[in-house]
Image (spheres, helix red, strand yellow):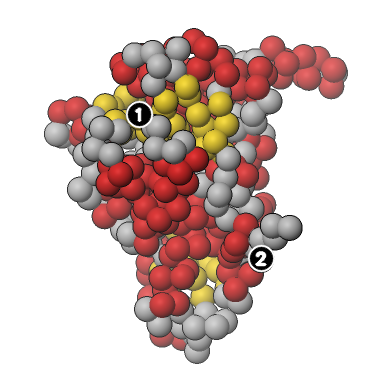
Amino acid sequence: MRIRSGLVDAIGRTPLIRLVRASEATGCEILGKAEFMNPGQSVKDRAALFIIEDAVRRGALKPGGVIVEGTAGNTGIGLALVANALGYRTVIVIPDTQSDEKKTMLRLAGAELVEVPAVPYKDPNNYVKVSGRIAEELAKTEAAGAVWANQFDNVANRQAHVETTGPEIWNDLDGKVDGFVSAVGTGGTLAGVAMALKERSADVKIALADPPGAALYSYYTTGELKSEGSSITEGIGQGRITANLEGLEVDHAYQIPDAVAVQVVFDLLEHEGLCLGGSSGVNVAGAIRLARDLGPGKTIVTILCDYGTRYQSKLFDPAFLRSKNLPVPAWLERKGAVDL
Ligand code: PMP
């Protein structure tokens, strides 16, 4: 019998799933690491666990203490679940633009939710900065202490991928991996997996897949942090070099338009039964681009970041898609017809 000893032990060791149509179209093996199969249904469970364990090791977090974080949602969900399992509380600051499904999940997991307007990072009322200030205040008043998870600049986040995601990919493929591609929110996944894989083989190609509105595609192709446009994807799209991204070198960089990303998401659901969020569409589209650049016969891995039901009210809502001039899959239209 192989039993996972609790929620914490159920995080990670996710399967690599062959993406059939992407593989057949490119002549490569395109594999998605099924991070939506984590207990919190996203890749961020890993970072949440490492951040909490690091805070406990440093003595910053004591039993009953509070973890405070600014998050687009998935990190908060991971933190709230791990906190429940290990005996901590969570205060989560979230921009009000994020999906209701993520907010509902946070509330039902017992997190205290602070919704703030979505303003740029340089604004003092940006969700990340608000969460830092709340942590500072609570650290003075809470007997059991309070810590700021600070996922963007806390490299315990990246370390989760150096120690778990990267080695899992390498070991599951017996080292037969030619490329890894990922979008960036904090950069923990891309930089951490890149470090783990490059340490094992300098030949592995690392690629960034960036949505419009992010500045990293420009940074890794021209050296300048510049952004243009916007994206409906959530949890990705970075405008600066976070501590987690420091030292990262990428071999390829791609910008993926929303129309392509959502088409990939709908295609994976319709033909392969994989129900995913928008960032997974960016990732798989990036994997297809990398496959074309590297040529047939290669094995390319990307991340299937989170589960699609988290975006029912946006990515899978015909009215929302139409409002953004994005394609609407036929079966969503059919569902509308039945509802009438
Ligand atoms: N996809 C989704 C849906 C996310 O929530 C995140 C995390 N913000 C990412 C991708 C990117 O992961 P990372 O923070 O490791 O760059």
Front residue of this view, candidates 294 and 189: 294
- Residue at disc 1, CB closer than 8 Å to ligand 1: no
- Where is mark 1, residue-wise? 178
Given residues 302 and 94, the one toward you in this image is 302
Residue at the image position 42 percent from the left and 41 percent from the top: 170
Q: Return the x and y of residue 54 as percentages of the image width and height.
A: 41, 70
CA gap, disc 1 and disc 2? 34 Å
What crowding class fits label 1: few (fewer than 14 Cα within 10 Å), some (14-19), or many (20 or more)? some
Whichever of labels 1 and 2 marks the residue nearer the N terminus, that label is 2
Residue 29 horizontal side relative to residue 184, left or right = right
Q: Which residue is mark 2?
A: 6
* Callout 1 secondary element: loop
Q: Is residue 211 visible?
A: no
Task: Say which quarter of the image contains residue 336.
Answer: top right
Residue 312 visible, this angle: yes
Give percent across and percent down for residue 218. Answer: 22, 29
| Quadrant in the rendering for residue 266 | top right
Mark 1 belongs to which amino acid?
Asp
**Picture coordinates of residue 227 (x, y %)?**
27, 31
Residue 115, labelled with which disc? Answer: none
Q: Quadrant of the N terminus?
A: bottom right
